[in-house]
Amino acid sequence: MALFGKKLAEAKIWHRPNMETLQRTANRGSVSTGYDIDNSLKLEDDNTENLYRALNGSTSTTKFTISMWAKRTEINGSQLLYHRGVAGNEGVFLRFATENASYPEALQVDIGASGTNSRSYTTASFRDTSAWYHVVLAVDTTQSTATDRFKLYVNGNLITDFASRNNPAEDFAMEVSSAKHRHGAYNDTDGFAGYCGYIAECHYIDGSQVAQTEFGEVDSDSGIWKPKAYAGSYGTGGYYLDFEASGDLGANAEGDGVDFTLNNIAAADQSTDTPTNNFCTLNPLVNFKYGTNAGGMTNGATVFGDNTGGGIGGAFGTFAVTAGKWYWEVKLTEQVAHYIGISAYPDDGDNVLSTSDPHQVNSSFVFNISGARIEYINGGSVTAGSADAFTDFHSVGDVISIALNMDDNQISMYGNGTLQAGVANTSIFDAANKMVVPFHATINDECQYNFGGYSVWTPSSVQNDENGYGTFEYAPPSGYYALCTQNLALYGG
């Protein structure tokens, strides 16, 4: 299998300028590692999804290491990755934070009692919603050198540039009695600082300050940081969450064997979007004419809704392609108006901030579901095909499938698994031979996307592409593949 690092320029998992620092080593999945991560856990703040457990009574009070992978799907306030402590006290915090206006979406580390004097903020912002971040916080408060008492690594890089850094006192003892480990929220049953996104490979090493190289390594061909199997000790109270058992997503596979309690998490929250096979999702960072993704994106950036009331809201996918054959699904949960298709925005560079309705961005092609017709934009001019060119799949529960053939610059639509002959293999017109992303526009409506890694609805029958990737309601047509990095490495350019 080709390494994705070699394919990045062609496959184009795209990002807007300034979306992240440490871009060079961001892991977009599919680097051949010899170590595959099969599953992740989707967490959603709106649903108060989190997991927690008590600390082992013999847990070290001065030394620990937390290692985890995270893929963000919403950028809307402070979001907690890990908390060790008692709710109401700072304890140990690791989160994406917006408290420091000069450094939005920084990583924040707290080690200490309640208050601001224990808080450290990176100067780097972590806003890339197309990539997985590997975050390691390694703590040893017995160190005589203050900056050695905690070490923060992102994608294998030791973070030394902090907007503010407050090191714990030497020999500072972290609380064990009544304290808990938490992922996804600060409290057990409410959504304070709730996390939105996916997490994978959560290791807690009790009693040791462990280097990041125990959990990952640089790929020699691409220079991308990639995961590897951890082979060391977990200590007395350590744990490992691999999220492989859908019926027991809080299972602790290593360490002391004590499982996590799940809050509002079900088997359906298991995902195959992982650091070694990264799937397309919807992009929360593109600002359209009528606001930031209108009503917003939730549930792993797969649910999109518009509530602007004044115009059409839009959404782009995080993956852009120039070649290959690709498949994805959209389930209608409301039925007013939907425009489903593709846009060459990242290639053409239209100003979607203020000038265009999202379904009229240049070099776009959409299926107007309510009108049952195609619409495309060439040179800023909208062309609408004949009405009723396909069946009016416009009811709640209908599943629209898109089959995009970038090798021949064609697109097809399926309705509830049936190919719509009137629009089969339609030319994508001005979007041909450009870099295109999945696209959706709607007004006062909602829909659910399934790119194969995660969907909020559970498919009635599990269908995969021919490489075994993706979990779909309907089988992708022969030769069409899920938009994931393992497939992009093979067919993306």
Image: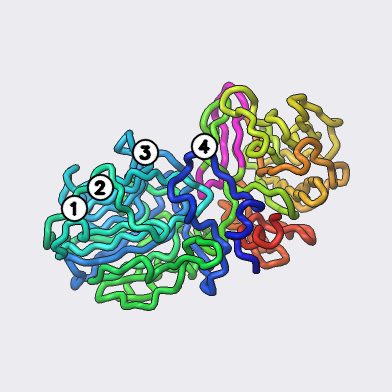
Earlier along the polypeptide chain: callout 1 or callout 3? 3
- Image coordinates of residue 187 in percent, x first then y, are 29, 51
Residue at disc 4, secondary structure: loop
Q: CA distance from mark 1 to mark 3?
A: 21 Å
Q: Is residue 306 magenta?
A: yes
Instruction: Say if mark 1 contacts mark 4, CB within 8 Å.
Output: no
Q: Residue drawn 69% across and 62% down? A: 490
**Compared to 47, does 285 lie above or below?**
above
Residue 182 in view in this figure: yes
Which residue is at the front of the view, 483 or 6? 6
Q: Which mark is residue 296?
A: 4
Q: Label for residue 167?
A: 1
Q: CA distance from mark 1 to mark 4?
A: 37 Å
Residue 295 image position (x, y, % from top left) = 52, 33
- Nearest to the eye among marks 1 and 4: give it: 1
Query: Given the image, on which type of amino acid does mark 3 rest?
Result: Pro
